[in-house]
Image: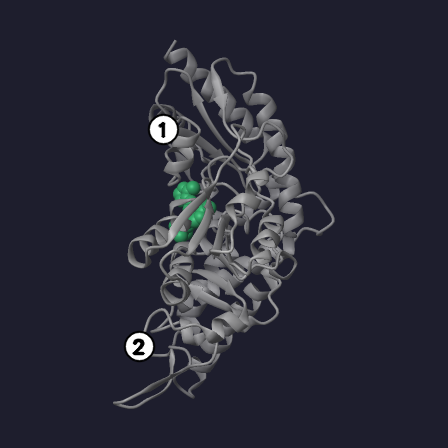
Amino acid sequence: MAAQPDACKALDPHVLRHDFPIFQRTVHGKPLIYLDNAATTQRPQAVINAIIEYYQRYNANVHRAVHTLSHEASVAYEGAHKKAAKFVNARSWREIIFTRNATEAINLVAYAWGLHNLQPGDEVLVTIMEHHSNLVPWQMLRELKKIELKFLDVTDQGRLKLDDLPKLITRRTKLVGMIYASNVLGTINPVREIIAEAQRVGAITVVDAAQAAPHIPIDVQALGCDFLAVSGHKMLGPTGVGFLYGRRELLEAMHPFLHGGDMISTVTTESVTFNELPWKFEAGTPNIAGGIGLGAAIDYLLALGVENVYAHEQKLLAYALEKLSQIDDLEIYGPKDTHDRLAVISFNLKGVHPHDVAGILDEAGIAVRSGHHCAQPLMRRLGMENTARASFYIYNSEDDVDALVDALKTVRKLFA
Ligand code: 7TS
């Protein structure tokens, strides 16, 4: 049974770990220390159970039949949309479209809004900090629609240069895309301010919240964004499901993304009318089990309190930055303070390739990522090609930081 700590109390990672069956295994004979949460998190038993229960007890297609199993599956799947709506404080669950992941959510905006609304000469502004998933779709539109793509720069410390905004946002700016929190540097961006600037010229705003949603409370109404993309697997949910929040008036006015079954209302040989929201944007049989699993993940996170998740990670971040700074020849990227920063720490050990660092840490049972983290323009801007990256979540403790620091000291000795 999932632990349900009091929302006012600090999270205890040692207790929470028991909810995650994966921590029963070892890696190279060592207890698993999982520090690759920015890539994907682990799943609690409650999420695994929700998926098993669907397949074992009410497996059926949704929206198509009057029989009991289909009704139960439909209620559960629709219920997951309602949970997602609550999670990001959308006005209506009809503003929540389930997708495969954050990448598909952003592509939905690019194809269903961008392709039909952008004209040659229009401008799209994104930050240089974007994950490729909020960059390459706009590059695709640059080719197809002859738009101009502009970039908001970062400081060497990895904070956005907000002072540049007034000159970058012009009357021709039609869309502003921004990463809420960086998957490389951990920086949490002032998206509310950027959205307010974009709104001055009537531009559409797209927030990539793939990294933010698992760690900080999201409120789309307070942000005032038009679209916001989330991946389920980065917030304890299954792979293969994420969602797009879209402002209702925009979604109503937009063309569909994919065409076929479920997204229609009536079809004749001559014409077609589209289904109501959100089904207009969910063509074909959806990932029903995944959606229900994501609903269970949201239940779990809301029971913990996302603000408590952030508070826990802030403590871990401060501890980790302090401990890691004691290692000679270790360069840490991103903001040096813990203010508006996730517990995502990219680093390099001088003279050692990050893949070697990750390989040796793996021998110690420690999972970290190494590479360009799908943010090559940012890496290039900051003068680096690859980094190792440790990213923390609710089940990580100061013990995990200590193990990481010890293992890095071993790497340093090996390469001395
Ligand atoms: N946006 C951000 C900010 C991300 O960090 C990622 C994935 C995505 C979008 C794409 O998510 P997907 O679920 O559609 O693939 N980031 C990472 C990472 O940092 N390491 O592996 C995946």
Residue 17 is at least partly visible in this image: no
Image point 56% across, 54% down: which residue? Answer: 198
Residue beneath label 2, please?
260
Q: Position of residue 162 (x, y in %)?
A: 58, 40
Mark 1 lies within 8 Å of ligand 1 (Cβ measured): no
Q: Nearer the viewer, residue 392 or 205?
A: 205
Q: Secondary structure at mark 1?
A: loop
Residue that protrudes farthest toward the right in the picture: 8
Q: Are marks 2 and 1 in contact (CB under 8 Å)?
A: no
Q: Nearer the viewer, residue 10 or 356?
A: 356
Residue 325 is at least partly visible in this image: yes
| 181 lies left or right of 308 | left
| 338 lies left or right of 122 | right
Looking at the rendered structure, the number of numbered marks drawn on it comes to: 2
Instruction: Kindly identify the amino acid type of the residue bearing the numbered disc 2.
Output: Gly
Mark 1, residues whose alpha carbon is within 10 Å: few (<14), some, or many (≥20)?
some
| 294 lies left or right of 256 | right
Q: Mark 2 to mark 1: distance in Å?
A: 42 Å
Instruction: Kindly identify the amino acid type of the residue bearing the numbered disc 1.
Output: Glu
Counting residues from the start of the chain, the first of labels 2 and 1 encountered is 2
Quarter of the image for the C terminus: give it.
Answer: top left
Q: Position of residue 46 (x, y in %)?
A: 52, 58
The answer to which quarter of the image holds residue 356 is top left
Residue beneath label 1, please?
385
The answer to which quarter of the image holds residue 201 is bottom right
Mark 2, residues whose alpha carbon is within 10 Å: few (<14), some, or many (≥20)?
few
Is 175 situated above or below 26? Answer: below
Q: Position of residue 97 (x, y in %)?
A: 46, 67
